Each structure stands twice: as structure tokens, then as C-alpha cells.
Amino acid sequence: MANMFRGAFTAMITPMNEDGSVDFEGFRKNVKFQLEGGITGLFPLGTTAETPTLDENTEEEKIIEIVMSEVKEWEKSHNVKIPVVVGAGSNNTKDAVAYAERAKKAGATAVLIVTPYYNKPSQEGIFRHFEAVSKVGIPIIVYNIQGRTGVNIATETLERIADLPNIAGVKEASGNISQMMDVIARIKNRHPDFAVLSGDDGLTLPLIACGGDGVVSVVSNLTPNLVSEMVNAALSGDFEKARSLHYRLLPFFKAAFVDGNPSSIKYAMNLKGLPAGKPRLPLVEVCDSAKKVIEKALKDCSL
């Protein structure tokens, strides 16, 4: 499975209309923009998509329908495989199982399952959560992001999870490169197909250098071509080219989170004429000082 989850993937935003409704046609345009930019695969309905504010029937299901339709059409006309990893996380295990079943029925390649947030389960609780979802029978990318969930998945726990059926890899957004190296050393040795993807744009290059498989990127919403180029260069061992692109993009890697995600990337996309709109409450548009940082980074990176 690792080959399928090796490369540059986009954690897609959900564009909004002026009245706050989902801009479905804008989302369709963004999917096409990603495919034309050479992205490896797509992650809709994750954190960057503002999923907690979306209606699971009228909005989430329509988003899944659009992305699967566009990707299938692209695959047919270009004779390629584009993995679609649908966000299916919840802090209610029963709901996570239902969301995974929905994604499987829609034909998704895999699901992204985040650590249960707010309830702060024990490591045993985290294991049993993933054990329950693994029984759905669709590949799972584990999403470890302590900054948003309040709980870190210990490497010992991830080792146990990786032994379950249908576990394809991890999106590592702990921000801890030492932990990421432990995951590679302790899990990939036993499970060569276990993909280790960076959840932080700025750590993509060092993670690949340590044996990681790529990135689930926020920045690639705006620059799928450059992020793909950087990741593909690093994965092929051309670290000189990858380093050059990394440092070109570094100011924007920082600016894309200067006033929260996805508020910051949405502002940048609006500036560049890509469908984005404003975020939904409780997220708000970036502040004036952040706007200047984003504008400067776009200029400095020649984007």
C-alpha cells in the first residue's frame, strides 16, 4: 500500500460562497486544479476542510460525490490512479465507523482517522478506537495531531495499531521529528508498506530524508505543482533540487499557518483567484497583520 500513499497529497479546503454556503462548483474547480498540478492524491473532509462545521448529509456527501466523480474521470482519461483519502474521524467511535463505511461505499481509496479529541482517551482507548474502525475493511491513515486533539499517540500504541488489518500508514503532525524517526525505525521495519506522511509542510523534506513517504500538505492547495515537484525530487534522491524548492517555499510554509488553518491558506487562495471564500465560524478571516505576512510570503516565494 505504501506506493499508493507515497508522494504529495493535498488536505483540501472547502470553499465558501459569500452567504456562507459551500461553493460546490468552486470545490470542483479546486479538485481539477490539483489534478492538473500533478498532485499524487487528495484528502477531502479533514481539518483543513473545516469538517466540524459541515452538514454531514447535505454538504459532506456532496463533497465526496464531487471529488470521486472528478478523480474517476481523470483516472480514466489519463490512465493513472489518484488516491482519495476521505476524512472520517470523530471522537465518537460509532460515528467514525459510520463515516468510514460511508467513504468505503463511495469508493474512496482510504479514510483518515484522527485521534479522538476532547474526551482524551487513554492509549488503550485510542487502540480500541482504531481497532473498531479497522473492521470496516477500508485502508486507514492514522492521524496523530496532539496540538488539536490533546492526546499524542505513543509510538508503542501506533505499533499495536499498525498490526491491525487495513492500517495503511500515519499522517504525523506531532511536530516531533524524533518521534517520526522512531515511527519509521520501529514500524516500517516490520511493515514496509506502512506509509509515514508529514502533516507539517515545513517538515516534509527532513522526514523524507529520514525515510518518510511524503506529505499531506496545506500549502499545495495553492501550489500543487511546486509541492509535488519538491516531494518527487526528494523521494527520487535529488536532495539538491528538493532543498532548493523547500527553501523557496519556506516563507509560505510559515505564512500558511500565521493566523490559523485554514483561515491563512484561504486568504492566500483568494488573493490568487482560487475558490476559497471566508472560513465558517468559529474561524474568522485572518487579521490585518497576518494579511501582510501572507502577502509578503507570496511575493518572496514568487507565487
Image (cartoon, rainbow, N blue to C red):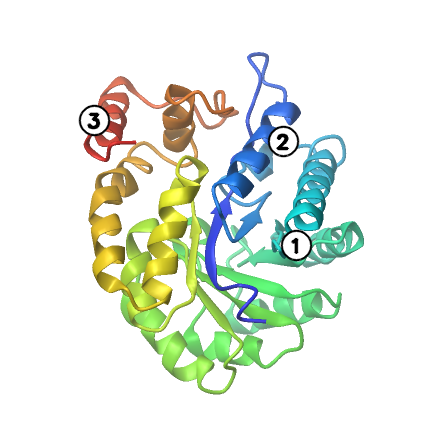
The amino acid type found where label 3 is placed reads: Lys
Dot in front, 1 or 3: 1
Q: Secondary structure at mark 1?
A: loop
Task: Tell me the CA gap for discs 2 and 3.
Answer: 29 Å
- Label 1 crowd bin: few (<14), some (14–19), many (20+), radius 10 Å: few
Q: Secondary structure at mark 2?
A: helix
Instruction: Give the residue drawn at x 49%, y 47%.
Output: 38
Q: Are marks 1 and 2 in contact (CB under 8 Å)?
A: no
Instruction: Give the residue drawn at x 26%, y 49%.
Output: 245
- Label 2 crowd bin: few (<14), some (14–19), many (20+), radius 10 Å: some
Dot in front, 2 or 3: 2
Place of residue 62 in the rendered image (x, y in percent of width and height, measured from the top left): 73, 34
Image side of residue 121 versus residue 214, left or right = right
The C terminus appears in which quarter of the rendering?
top left
Place of residue 47 in the rendered image (x, y in percent of width and height, measured from the top left): 51, 43
The amino acid type found where label 2 is placed reads: Arg
**Disc on the earlier residue, 2 or 3:** 2
Image side of residue 86 versus residue 249, left or right = right
Instruction: Give the residue drawn at x 40%, y 37%.
Output: 261
Q: Which mark is residue 296?
A: 3
Task: Tell me the CA gap for discs 1 and 2.
Answer: 20 Å
Task: Tell me the CA gap for discs 1 and 3.
Answer: 39 Å
Place of residue 282 in the rendered image (x, y in percent of width and height, measured from the top left): 48, 27
**Disc on the earlier residue, 1 or 2:** 2
Relative to residue 60, is residue 217 depicted above or below? below
**Disc on the earlier residue, 1 or 3:** 1
Can you see residue 12?
no
Query: In this figure, which residue is indicated by the disc labeled 1?
Result: 79
Dot in front, 1 or 2: 1
Closer to the camera in the image, 138 or 82: 82
Closer to the camera in the image, 132 or 294: 294
Query: In this figure, which residue is indicated by the disc labeled 2?
Result: 28
